[in-house]
Image (cartoon, rainbow, N blue to C red):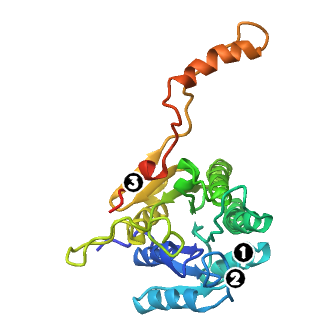
Amino acid sequence: MSALPLEGLSAIVTGAGRGLGRAEALELARLGAAVVVNDFGQPGRDGSGEASDAPAEQVAAEIRAAGGRALAHTGDVADFQQAGALVELAITEFGKLDVLVNNAGILRDRMVFSMTEDEWDAVIRVHLKGHFNTTHFAAAHWRERSKAAGGAVYGRIVNTSSEAFLAGSAGQPNYAAAKGGIVGLTTSTALALAKYGVTANVICPRARTRMTEDVFAGFGRPDDSVRGLDPLAPEHVAPLVGYLASPAAERINGQLLVVHGGMVAIVERPRVQAKFDSKQDTFTYDELDALLSPHYAQRPEGETFAAAEVLGLKRE
């Protein structure tokens, strides 16, 4: 019987007490990884409420009950020192860190003209800074291991973006900006760490969780009489995370993938749609008007990226 694909590896999953992170932690454990389950444990999806050990402890206990190895960590990954302690815990308890899955996040939705500074800062802090903090300490660990070994080591980063970045989300300027920043962080990290044997990829998952219950309200669940998972169940996303964490994905680096029930889409880097050259040293206003206005006039008036159309989802 062949070994499990992640046997002998250790992993961290942030925001793993519920929803996507929980499903991902369970999947990594099922594939053989020892897992540090991180969750700050605040009950509100906006990051409100008193922090609790319970969500992380419950998932870690679930993994152990199934025969796996797991520890709980209840620190705030948006705090630089606590993120460092999280990475150090995995190294101390399991001997090394091999896989980092960044998933922790909060929502504080509001239109850009109504959003407060605190609502902006809080979401950027948890999503973008939280991703950076853990990545920083994991990257330093892999770099030191590589220097000591005199060659490449095993390292995988799977970050979590969103189609709010790809398609826009009118009531989530903070969230969309943070998720776009995570894509930039991922591609930069992929280039920086490739020589050490480490890959970094980013997913845009569609899943019905505590954070997205409003977003997907009205999008159908399977009837109770019909067997099968909800198409938006987090369990549809977790297998891709397990694959990207595995040795089989060694040639996948710096990639952005959309994933939901039964579908994985590879997103291309932005491409040039049209190109115009000035006939003199630099453009004049009139020349730009003559070139660009007709180009955009060809598009239907008011054309935009409608989130539901981009998602390919249909309401009941």
Q: Is residue 131 among what the camera can see?
A: yes
How many numbered discs sit on the rendered protein? 3
Estimate how packed mark 2 is, as few (under 14), some (14 to 19) or many (20 or more) residues with alpha carbons within 10 Å: many
Answer whether labels 1 and 2 touch (C-beta < 8 Å): yes
Looking at the image, which residue is at 48% across and 30% down? 300
Pick the quarter of the image with the C terminus.
bottom left
Secondary structure state at the residue bearing disc 2: loop
Q: Amino acid at mark 3?
A: Val
Q: Nearer the viewer, mark 3 or mark 1?
A: 3
Relative to 266, is 143 above or below?
below
Image-based side of 115 in relation to 210, left or right: right
Of 73 and 52, the residue lying toward us: 52
Answer whether labels 2 and 3 touch (C-beta < 8 Å): no
Secondary structure state at the residue bearing disc 1: helix
Which labelled disc corresponds to residue 75?
2
Q: Amino acid at mark 1?
A: Ala
Estimate how packed mark 3 is, as few (under 14), some (14 to 19) or many (20 or more) residues with alpha carbons within 10 Å: some
Which labelled disc corresponds to residue 264?
3
Mark 2 or 3 closer to N-term? Answer: 2
Looking at the image, which residue is at 35% across and 62% down? 261
Image-based side of 301 in relation to 261, left or right: right
Mark 1 or 2 closer to N-term? Answer: 2
Work out how far the residue at label 2 is from the one at label 3, CA to CA, in angstroms. 32 Å
Secondary structure state at the residue bearing disc 3: strand
Looking at the image, which residue is at 38% across and 72% down? 4
Work out how far the residue at label 3 is from the one at label 1, CA to CA, in angstroms. 30 Å
Mark 3 or 1 closer to N-term? Answer: 1
Work out how far the residue at label 1 is from the one at label 2, CA to CA, in angstroms. 7 Å
Q: Report the residue marked by disc 1.
A: 83
Of 21 and 137, the residue lying toward us: 21
Q: Amino acid at mark 2?
A: Gly
